[in-house]
Amino acid sequence: MDVWSAKFGGGKGKGRNIFWLLWYDSNLRLRIFFPEKMARNKEALILLIDVGPSMHSVLPEIQKVCSLLIQKKLVFNKYDEVGVVVFGTKDTDNDLMKEVGGYEHVTVLQPIKVVDGDLVDVTQQLPQGTHPGDFMDAIVVGMDMLIKKYQDTIKGKKRICLITNAMYPIKDPYEGTKEDQVYTIAEQMAAHGMKIDCIIYRGDQNPVPHNTTIEENDMLLSIFSKKTKAKAVHVESSTSLLGALRTRNLAPVTTFRGDLELSPTCKIKVWVYKKTSEEKFPTLKKYSDKAPSTDKFATHEIKLDYEYKSVQDPSKVVPPEQRIKGYRYGPQVIPISSAEFEAAKFKPEKGVKLLGFTSASNIMRHYYMKDVNIIIADPGNKKAILAVSALARAMKEMDKVGILRCVWRQGQANVVIGVLTPNVSDKDNIADSFYFNVLPFAEDVREFEFPSFSNLPKSLQPNKEQQEAADKLVMMMDLAPAGKEEALRPEFTPNPVLERFYHHLELKSKNPDAAVPPLDSTLKRITEPDHEVVSQKKLVIDEFCRNFELKENPKLKKSVRRLLRDQKSGSFEGQVGKIENKSMDIVGSTSAVKVGTIGELTAVQDFEAMISRRDSPEWVSKAIFGMKNKVLDLVENSYEGDNYPKALECLVALRKGCVIEQEPKQFNNFLQHLYRFCEEKDLKSFCEFLASKDVTFITKTEAEDSDIADKDARSLFVKAET
């Protein structure tokens, strides 16, 4: 028999108590149980789903999103409790109908219970109703379930999620108007710490002719968002429906609580939260099956212990107090103790300071880095709320933004500079606030210069018809056309990779050998082009294809063939031709090992590997720049011409690469620079060596962008030869 011992104790912090249980099991092992700690962040959720006749076409999508919600809770919030209520059914099954009557066609499909695999099956097998649903009756039934189950506990963690099209009228109340009834229900929700999310799906269904009914229902549902912590969302597609239901309950955590220092004498108490953050894959931990099946409290976790052993005596374990960190400095390892490391750390003081204001037009959208934060006034501090509101509205009126210096935590290693943007609220129950985005330092900015299309030869520039066809194609891809809902709205578009992962995880929980399922049809609308849009705009696509016919580039093919076969241009003869035959074909080969620099022994091979890389556009310019430096080094460090053959080989490879990549000016300018360099350094013998090997400029015949005519190919060495 187990021996139980109950203990009560006070935890740290104002108004917080901890309750725990201690007992010895039959094997005299001490057990401890913290029910408050485990259930502290749990959420109680009621799903209210309209299954009436007008919702039959969208029920498969509702089943997907509801089952996905349960699957995510099983991963992230396994102590959450969920109940499922459907309305619009033929039968009636709820406690209120049995106690007071009414509330017809509302069925409690699943009473409130801790999430498990059975709940997934319930949400995947929703019944098809036969009567128009009354969403107000369903809301009252859901409230009744939460009140009976939790009374006044877990305040603020009780949520109702309503999914309906709200196209049919609700019943008139016994007393007062429908609007009075909604206000009464909203007040009861606020008193019991409940929230409600209303997802109104209209989709492509033909609307019921009673437009006044739809407008009235929308007005009634909007009252909840005004009087309680709620939101009402209208969606028109199954994709938006998949992203409209909040599947994860993330508790907001403050990044900073303190003063927003406008000046040494003017400070505002603020809180800083993360407004957005990247959703990542859940942490996949290792699992051990060595624990006995009879042990209900086994965690099945695997703990890793590391041992550090001496190099001189591998059998000797070095204890932590005898270890010290080492950092490489060239070939040596420099030991630095933790005390020295801490002493050298930059430790700025915690605080948020205003550096100044600037015009909003000076801060470009692409300057923003990392996630966006939201800065609000200290809740309950009326003076702070008024100060934040006054500052935000003044900045909005003058079109200004602030520049802040932020240190979120004491001892933080880095200082953040960012832009403060006013966020003026249009709702009475939501205070004004600020958005904060991190700005880059000068070292973080990368300037990429791209050549203008106007620099291309006239033959390569688009004509009027091509420009118009391209403009029409771009306009066709508008995700927010006039008169329609924006497609793939960011706040309602789920990550298809994560959604597929959770679906596969649920399948593997039932069958460990389950294969990866095919991509869902709803998710395909995110990852693939919209077939409806493509079919509607087929004329635009066909016109673009007619104006931009794809064909081989004969010019590039011709110049490469000339290089490889030594045709009539006469640019490569004798030894140059032999060198080329030894080098690799740049176009036809790619390096298995990704080379990033020009080496000493394999300069030509490294150059060819770099110039053939296509994982970044900057490799071509890096390869050309590196080969130029290599040629100059070989020529300058040559003793009685011993490096001239190697320099010639590199120069020939550079010329060939510039022809293939259509960069003739790079080579021609470098050849002129090399000639002047040799004259200044008294290395005219190398110029004579090049003239004898017949290395010439890249002509216009070989590359369209070249400014050198065929007759001037050898103009650089005419003086030297005479």
Image (cartoon, grey):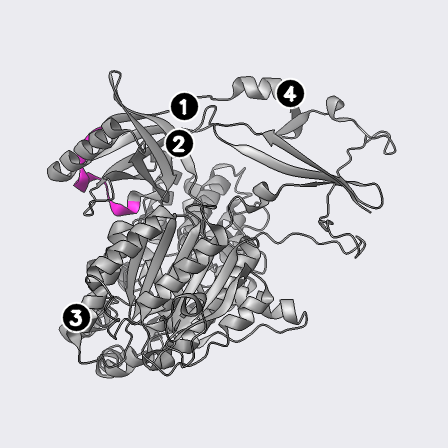
Residue 523 in sight from this viewpoint: no
Q: Is residue 503 above or below residue 10?
A: below
Given residues 404 and 323, the one toward you in this image is 404
- Can you give x and y, in whole percent of width and height, for residue 176 in the image? 19, 61
First in residue order: circle 2 vs circle 4: 2
- Which is nearer the N-term, disc 2 or disc 1? 2
**Numbered tag placed on residue 580 in the rendering:** none
- Say what amino acid the circle numbered 2 marks: Phe
Name above or below for residue 211 compared with residue 255: below
Q: In which quadrant of the rendered view does residue 53 lie?
A: bottom left
- Decide which of tag 1 and tag 3 comes sooner along the chain: 1
* Nearer-the-camera pick, 430 or 21: 21
Q: What residue type is labelled 1?
A: Lys
Mark 3 is on which residue type? Gly
| Left or right of 23 on screen, residue 26 | right
Residue 604 pos. (x, y %): 53, 54
Give the SS element for disc 4: loop
Q: Give the range drawn in magenta.
A: 356-366
Residue beneath disc 3: 483
CB under 8 Å between discs 4 and 3: no
Residue 260 drawn at (x, y percent) = 30, 26
Quarter of the image for residue 454 reads bottom left
Mark 4 belongs to which amino acid? Answer: Ser
Residue placed under numbered mark 1 in the picture: 350
Q: Going by the image, does 310 lie left or right of 487?
A: right
Q: Which mark is residue 337?
A: 4
CB within 8 Å, label 2 to label 4: no
